[in-house]
Image (cartoon, rainbow, N blue to C red):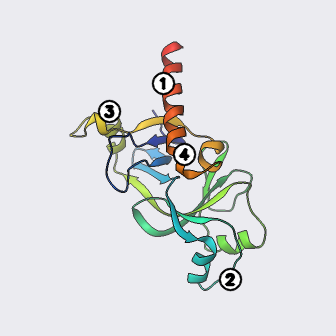
Amino acid sequence: MNLTGQLLIAPPTMKDRFWHKAVVLVTENHLRGSLGIIVNKITNLSVNDFTRQLNEECMLPGHIYAGGPVNTNAMTMLHSNDWECENTLKITGDIGLSSHKDIIKILAMGSCPRYWRIMLGLCVWQPNQLESELAGKHGYDHNQSWLLASSDLETIFEGDTKYCWTQAIERSGSEFVQKILD
């Protein structure tokens, strides 16, 4: 099962400080491992404050998001697929992930997708690690396993991020029941 484009939702029993109530969009899932971006961990750093730290002056709305605990200096933009650059990875039909050294300047010039977020960091799993976590195998506690749900623009970009986890859990439950009924 290819998990690319799926949401991984931390269950209520997962109390780790970083992963508690995390919603992760799986951006890549293949034989070499899996990558993802946490979509609901907003930081206190505004995009404007961040650009000042880069010695750039840009007036852009929003905050920086903590995309994951790995490579926290890596900046990417999670966005709707109505925009792309040469480094865009299309995750689903609606969602893409882009990296470009001038992405802030491009946004500041008005070339913006409908939905976008600047992310720092990412989530990484070794080959078969994520699948093992989901299956509760190889020493992973199944009660600590991720919940799964499909992703969409609304869950990821619309509304308050503090409700994203609850919405994702509701979606996961609805999709689970629908699979049983089908």
The reply to whether the C-beta atoms of the residues labelled 1 and 2 are less than 8 Å apart is no
Amino acid on which disc 4 is placed: Cys
Q: From this viewpoint, which residue is outermost toward the bottom?
A: 55
Q: What residue sits right under mark 4 in the picture?
A: 164
Q: What residue sits right under mark 3 in the picture?
A: 135
Q: CA distance from mark 4 to mark 1?
A: 18 Å
Q: Secondary structure at mark 2?
A: loop
Q: Residue at x 29, y 35 (%)?
A: 143
Q: Residue at x 49, y 68 (%)?
A: 74
Residue 144 image point, x, y percent: 30, 39
Q: CA distance from mark 1 to mark 2?
A: 47 Å
Q: Secondary structure at mark 4?
A: helix
Amino acid on which disc 2 is placed: Glu
Residue 99 image point, x, y percent: 59, 65
Q: Residue at x 47, y 51 (%)?
A: 36
Q: From this viewpoint, which residue is outermost toward the right?
A: 110
Q: What residue sits right under mark 2 in the picture?
A: 57
Q: Nearer the viewer, mark 4 or mark 1?
A: 4
Q: Nearer the viewer, mark 3 or mark 4?
A: 4
Pick the front one: 111 or 14: 14
* Marked residue nearer the N-terminal end (3 or 1): 3
Q: Secondary structure at mark 1?
A: helix
Amino acid on which disc 1 is placed: Phe
Q: What residue sits right under mark 1 in the picture?
A: 176
Q: Nearer the viewer, mark 3 or mark 2?
A: 2
Q: Residue at x 62, y 62 (%)?
A: 87
